[in-house]
Every structure is written in C-alpha cells, then in structure tokens.
Image: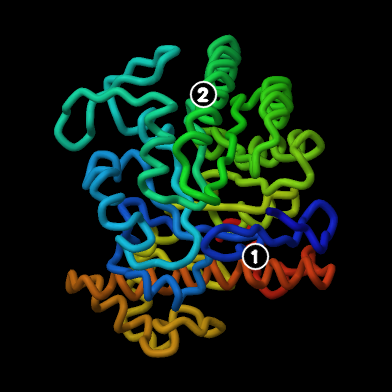
Amino acid sequence: MFTIFQTDGAARRGVFATAHGEIQTPVFMNVGTQAAIKGGLSGDDLVTVGCQVELSNTYHLHLRPGAEVVRGMGGLHRFMRWDGPILTDSGGFQVFSLARPKDISEDGVSFSSHIDGRKLFLRPEDSMDIQAALGADIAMAFDECVENPAPYAYVKASTERTTRWLERCIVRQRETAPPGQALFGIGQGGTYDDLRVAHMRRIAAFDLPGYAIGGLAVGESAEEMYHILEVLHPVMPADKPRYLMGVGTPKNIYEAVLRGVDFFDCVLPARNARHGHVFTHEGHINLKNEQYKTDPAPIDPLCQCPTCRTYSRAYLRHLFKAGEILALRLSVLHNLFFYNRLLADIRRAIENGALRALPGAYPCLSGEK
C-alpha cells in the first residue's frame, strides 16, 4: 500500500494507496475534529486549499452525533461530503487529555464526558467499532498518551498495556472494518530512548500498514522530540508510512521530514488563524496588530490562496476588530493553503534532492519566527 520512489537523506517521497485515493507523502492532514474544519470551511474548501487527507476525531463523533448516526448517513465521506481519504484517531488522546476524572484499567478507560459529565467507558474494541462505523480509510489503534515528563516505571507499564490493547484492536478491526480500511499502530515511550525503541520494535512485529509516533509535542522540548525521531528512525519499518501525531509548526514538520517522517496533523494552523495568527514564507504574523491597520498587502505576497489573491491585511484586521466571522474563515483558508503548499514544495524538493536548500525559499523553516 506504500511505495517510496525517492529519498533525500532520511527524507522519503512516497505514495500511500487508500480506498478513496492515493496520498502523496510527506503529507499534512487537515484536522476536521467534528467532521468540519473550525472556521467555517466545507468539503469543497478542502479541495481549494489542496487537502489530501481529512482527519476526524473518534471521541468527539462518538459523543456527538454518535457513530451509528454517521453510519446511517452513509459514513463520514457522505456525511461531510468529502470524497478523499479520511483518517480517524482512536480517541485515546482526547480521553486522556479532555475527559476527567478518568480511570485506566486493563479492559479500557472510564471517564466523564466533557460535554455533559455522563459516565462513559471506552475499550480498544469500542474504538475499532466506532472507526468502522465512521468508515475511515485509516484507523488508529487505541493507546494511552502519557504526558512528558512522566515516571519511567509508569511509562514502561503504559507501553506494555498499549501493546496488549493493540493486539485486541487488530482482532476486532479484522472482524468489523469496512473493506480497505488500514490500521496504524502507535508507538509510545515518553522521552525514554530504550522504551521508545523497545515499544516500536514490539509493535512493528505485527506488520501493520503504518505506524505512528505518539506522545510527543506534549510537554517536551523540540530538541527532545527531534532526538526521539532520530532514535526511532533505524527501528521503524522502512517500507511503512511514519506518522508523527499532533505536530506542529512549519519548522517542526520540516525537521521531522528530514528525520524520515511521512504523515503529520495538527490543529495549530486552523486554531492560530482563528485568533489572527497567520503563516507566511518569512514567519507568522498577528493580523490584529496596529501596524496592519492600513496595510494594503496580502497576508503573504508569495501565496496564491483565495484570501491572498483578494484581500488585504488591513481588511482582515478590520474584520477581526469588528468581530466578523468572515475573519476566521479567510484566515483559516490561508493557513491551511499555506501548510498544504509547504508540503507540496517539500515533496518537490525531495524529488530534486534539494530538501536542505528549502529554507532559502521558506525562511520560516530556519527558526520559529
């Protein structure tokens, strides 16, 4: 299902085939948590911004409207009118970050809904059933995401339990998955090199269609994250896609691609855009700042998104100051277009053996401006 046809150092240029089309990698997946991109974007807008993969959230869709409602409407693709590939996360991160109080047992996790406080219980099998009902092209195994730093003994026990949960996910997914659905395993281990390596080697033995690196960008420094990627590079299956979950800034993505990562997702571009923080080739800017009050330039003169082709920084600043919803939509359109264009340029640079020269065209990749 995954073919690598060009490399540039550790960076890989590939294609991953799914039931709803091919994914050109490296790829940034656009996050539509509740089957919608926050900021007022539709499935048609995803095409406009160059999205290849839409990512929805198992936990949130399980609570509202319910997986069986989505199944009855023909699955996520028909429900949200998006014909491309869809990845659904397992719900694990949300259970461990949003739902409190929580109680983790060998069987699963009990927790309280963040919406109405009702008591819920989620097992690995439940996560697989929900993702089957949603009709995802790529389903993620149910795991525990541990914050960094965490005690070594707890992280070790957590990775062992996550492996046992993965075994249960594999059995259930084979029984209930729609045709063509791929299951990705998730490697954990905190910031401990030995636990990371041991866990990835253990789950790689299951020979799944893809593998994710979880539990990063949750408290550790960027340097620690890059180090973990370097430690994992030799032990991750070379012929399977590698997915770094929940990352991140343009520089984070670029540095991870240099270290062999293929898939990315993050709420950052859409979330930041809704607060007026937009990305440019030079670095991010805050449209709410006074300096843009009479600025006739587009957000990024090098960008060809619908927002930059039409509107000025001054107009966008006015919309934010006036509390107009249009400000959110136009800014999110720009940021997602920027991210998808960046990944397209990364793919092109790998093809040309010029990835390390890319910061010349994208100065933002040289720092966190």
Tell me if residue 170 comes above or below residue 5 in the rendering.
above
In front: 278, or 354?
354
Who's the residue at 47% across and 56% down the image?
86
In front: 290, or 99?
99
Residue 305 rendering spot, x and y as whole percentages = 46, 81
Tell me if residue 211 comes above or below residue 278 in the rendering.
above
* Mark 2 vs mark 1, CA separation in Å: 30 Å
Q: Amino acid at mark 2?
A: Arg
Who's the residue at 63% across and 71% down the image?
344
Considering only order in the chain, which callout, 1 or 2, is on the residue closer to the N terminus?
Answer: 1
Q: Which residue is mark 1?
A: 24
Say whether marks 2 and 1 touch (CB < 8 Å): no
Residue 151 rendering spot, x and y as whole percentages = 55, 14
Find numbered disc 2 in the image and state the secondary structure of the residue it sits on: helix
Q: Which residue is mark 2?
A: 168
Q: In screen coordinates, is 226 left or right of 270?
A: right
The answer to which quarter of the image holds residue 222 is: top right
Residue 368 rendering spot, x and y as whole percentages = 58, 56
Who's the residue at 69% across and 75% down the image?
361
